[in-house]
């Protein structure tokens, strides 16, 4: 039972971090950033030296952990900010649909850039191998990584919530999420806020990259895709634009997925995701605005 | 009246076309032509290229020894770009270039379009390393073959070997439902398990290749009263690495049995000090094959391509040209039906990578000699070889 709880929390953490990264950007500029998954992949590939060989040539990945983790977070944040400066800034007055298409295009550009440098062959790396040791917590045996994922996610979420609620930048960001035009009129510097949101979102992508890379030992140009899809669904269920909603829904989807895998009979287990998506549809039927509807989104939809 | 005229003109047309498709078995220079409709770009390239390089080595050997039926083998290529529609075009393109035999992509789904094109022209096609029964008579037609061994044989081999040599009794079955190949391995395992006296299935579960975590699957294994003797893991890259890493990180030390798809040392860095891990292979890429000729082949391969073979999927390319050339030699002609008849007469025909058998029902291996590679403390090496006691029957293969 406890084991199931930990499994649910660790998978939920992953989805919550992803959902938050998408919700942050959606909050300030109504952009569903479909390039988010490719930012995740890019952050892991930054550890390798470009080569199309089957064996990965680890380069930056050789750094000790206290340099490695900030490096990956910085790569995620940097790429994310770069994509705002180079691409999304030019779509400031475009419709959300146009921006969404642009984000798809950007995702393809990032993915094919990686394809060019590294080939489509999945590569194996040993990222923070110390985390693959089993530990015992309250009678449940689990990989250390699972525990760290849960703790780190909780720390990040608390930190972020303090940041958003207690700092001036956080206030500006919330104001921008609520009503962007009004916030600008009241002196919020739009580009700075948007850039900040992109940096945070990119760093969250970096955090997912570390967890995924360390958990699976695999880097693959498509590795961000599955998490991105679940995270996007979480932001929709949570209520587009609502940060709390995204996190809550991320944990719920993770939990639903783990519980389905545990309780479904063997014949039904291959269709686990169908059951999860079925639950998603049910939620949306009863709460089309999402679990926690963001105040700013209602009249615009 | 009109009808007769039409028939006459059609038959004239047919007659004039006949030499182009039938009699003209070699190109203008009198060479025999092998066409490769394989992926030179896209993700299949990683699978097609090594096997194709191995095929080229055998072709060069044959040409150096005087050729086939006294003629040189010429090679023509067309890129499928890892795309099914392009695959059919690539098949046509090599047939237009005069191919007498068409080699198609490793995977059934990607190779089938070109193989079907060859089939409709009455030419022989060979899948480079497909391990589904569909890659042959069942999925393409009577002129189609696969150079590899059925996935089910791998699952059956591992089950019987672990039972006999490692005294494994309770097995756990963990299937990745993303690809048909994986199901093939578990089908072979399912067929073999009831034949092994007092062997039991301790439990089973499924996952998907791109699952971010298989923590709940692992919790189910740990909830068993006793750690299973062996876990039959039916999966492929890259999900395999992730699953193995997570199983070991959770402290489960059962022996892990796999299909050939996880052969190779290129991914072992992801699971440092992996032990108690077993893979069936057609030949060893680790320099310790019991057959010295295989090690000599590895050296030759390195000389030609600059690197050692990365996985055992290099080898079927070599066996493929080998058995096809023997059949052509025995038939004394390049005519497809005569060559197919000779191939179907092969019963335990020796090749560098184990004996090969083809029949008029099955153009694939439902029984094969496998080397067993064990990985101990991160080092893979051949420890044994095994041939299943009886071939996997048709109904288990068609499941």
Image (cartoon, coloured by chain):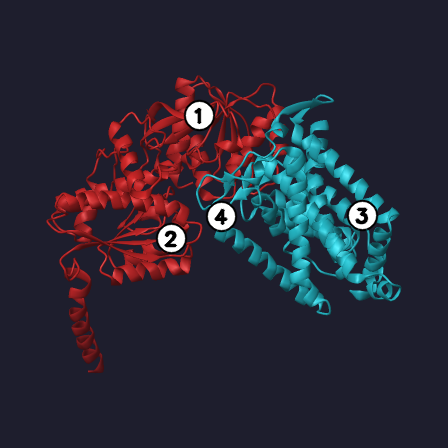
Chain colours: A cyan, B red
Q: Which residue is mark 2?
A: B39
Q: Which residue is mark 1?
A: B379
- Gap between marks 3 and 4, in whole Å? 37 Å
Residue A44 in sight: yes
Chain letter of mark 1 equals B
Q: Nearer the viewer, mark 1 or mark 2?
A: 1
Sequence-first disc among 1 and 2: 2
* Distance between mark 4 and mark 2 Cα atoms: 17 Å
Confirm or deny contact between disc 4 and disc 1 (CB under 8 A).
no
Which residue is found at the position 59% from the left and 47% from the top?
A41
Quadrant of res B152: top left
Dividing the image into 4 quarters, which one contains the C terminus of chain A?
A: bottom right
Q: Nearer the viewer, residue A23 or A111?
A: A111
Mark 2: give few (<14), some (14-19) or many (20+) Cα within 10 Å. Answer: many
Any mark on residue A244, and which?
3
Residue B238 rendering spot, x and y as whole percentages: 51, 40
Q: Chain of mark 2?
A: B
Compared to residue B151, the image places residue A296 above or below, namely below
Q: Chain of mark 4?
A: A
Labels 4 and 1 positioned on one and the same chain: no
Q: Are marks 3 and 4 on the same chain?
A: yes
* Residue matched to label 4: A118
């Amino acid at each position: 039972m406890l084991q199931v709880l930990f499994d649910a929390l660790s998978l939920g953490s992953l989805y919550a971090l992803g959902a938050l990264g998408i919700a942050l950007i959606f909050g300030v500029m109504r952009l569903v950033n479909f390039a988010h998954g490719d930012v995740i992949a890019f952050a892991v590939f930054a550890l390798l030296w470009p080569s199309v060989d089957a064996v990965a040539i680890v380069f930056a990945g050789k750094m000790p952990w206290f340099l490695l983790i900030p490096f990956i977070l910085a790569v995620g944040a940097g790429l994310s900010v770069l994509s705002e400066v180079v691409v999304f800034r030019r779509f400031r007055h475009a419709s959300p649909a146009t921006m969404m298409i642009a984000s798809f295009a950007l995702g393809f550009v990032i993915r094919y850039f990686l394809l060019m440098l590294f080939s489509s062959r999945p590569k194996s790396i040993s990222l923070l191998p110390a985390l693959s040791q089993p530990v015992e917590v309250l009678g449940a045996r689990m990989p250390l990584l699972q525990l760290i994922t849960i703790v780190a996610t909780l720390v990040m979420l608390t930190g972020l919530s303090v940041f958003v609620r207690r700092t001036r930048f956080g206030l500006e960001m919330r104001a921008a999420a609520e009503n962007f035009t009004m916030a600008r009129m009241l002196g919020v510097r739009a580009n700075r806020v948007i850039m900040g949101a992109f940096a945070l979102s990119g760093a969250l992508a970096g955090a997912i990259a570390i967890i995924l890379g360390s958990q699976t030992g695999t880097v693959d140009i498509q590795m961000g895709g599955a998490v991105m899809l679940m995270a996007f669904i979480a932001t929709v269920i949570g209520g587009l634009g609502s940060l709390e909603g995204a996190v809550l829904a991320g944990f719920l989807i993770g939990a639903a997925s783990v519980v389905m895998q545990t309780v479904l009979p063997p014949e039904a287990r291959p269709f686990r995701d169908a059951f999860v998506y079925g639950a998603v549809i049910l939620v949306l039927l009863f709460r089309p605005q999402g679990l926690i509807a963001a105040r700013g989104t209602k009249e615009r939809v | 009246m009109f009808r007769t005229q039409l028939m006459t003109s059609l038959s004239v047309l047919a007659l004039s076309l006949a030499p182009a498709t039938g009699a003209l078995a070699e190109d203008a220079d009198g060479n025999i032509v092998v066409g490769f409709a394989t992926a030179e770009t896209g993700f299949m390239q990683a699978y097609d290229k090594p096997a194709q390089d191995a095929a080229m080595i055998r072709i060069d050997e044959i040409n150096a020894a005087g050729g086939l039926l006294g003629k040189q083998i010429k090679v023509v290529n067309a890129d499928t770009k890892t795309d099914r529609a392009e695959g059919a075009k690539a098949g046509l393109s090599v047939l237009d270039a005069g191919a007498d035999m068409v080699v198609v992509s490793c995977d059934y789904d990607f190779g089938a379009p070109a193989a079907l094109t060859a089939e409709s022209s009455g030419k022989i096609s060979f899948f480079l390393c497909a391990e589904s029964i569909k890659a042959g008579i069942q999925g393409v037609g009577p002129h189609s073959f696969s150079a590899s061994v059925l996935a089910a044989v791998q699952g059956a081999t591992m089950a019987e070997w672990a039972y006999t040599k490692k005294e494994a009794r309770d097995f756990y079955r963990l299937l990745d439902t993303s690809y048909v190949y994986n199901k093939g391995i578990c089908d072979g395992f399912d067929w073999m398990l009831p034949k092994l006296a007092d062997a039991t299935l301790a439990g089973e579960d499924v996952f998907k290749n791109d699952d971010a975590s298989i923590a709940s699957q692992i919790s189910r294994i740990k909830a068993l009263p006793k750690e299973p003797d062996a876990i039959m893991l039916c999966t492929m890259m890259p999900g395999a690495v992730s699953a193995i890493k997570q199983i070991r990180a959770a402290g489960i030390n059962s022996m892990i049995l796999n299909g050939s798809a996880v052969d190779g040392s290129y991914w072992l860095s992801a699971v440092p000090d992996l032990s108690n891990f077993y893979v069936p292979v057609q030949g060893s890429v680790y320099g310790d094959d019991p057959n010295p000729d295989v090690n000599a082949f590895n050296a030759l391969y390195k000389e030609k391509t600059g690197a050692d073979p990365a996985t055992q999927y290099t080898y079927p390319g070599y066996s493929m040209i080998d058995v096809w050339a023997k059949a052509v030699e025995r038939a004394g002609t390049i005519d497809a039906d005569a060559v197919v008849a000779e191939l179907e007469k092969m019963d335990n025909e020796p090749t560098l990578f184990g004996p090969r058998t083809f029949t008029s029902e099955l153009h694939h291996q439902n029984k094969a000699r496998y080397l067993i590679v064990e990985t101990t403390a991160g080092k893979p090496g051949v420890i044994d070889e095994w041939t299943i006691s009886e071939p996997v029957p048709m109904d288990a293969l068609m499941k």
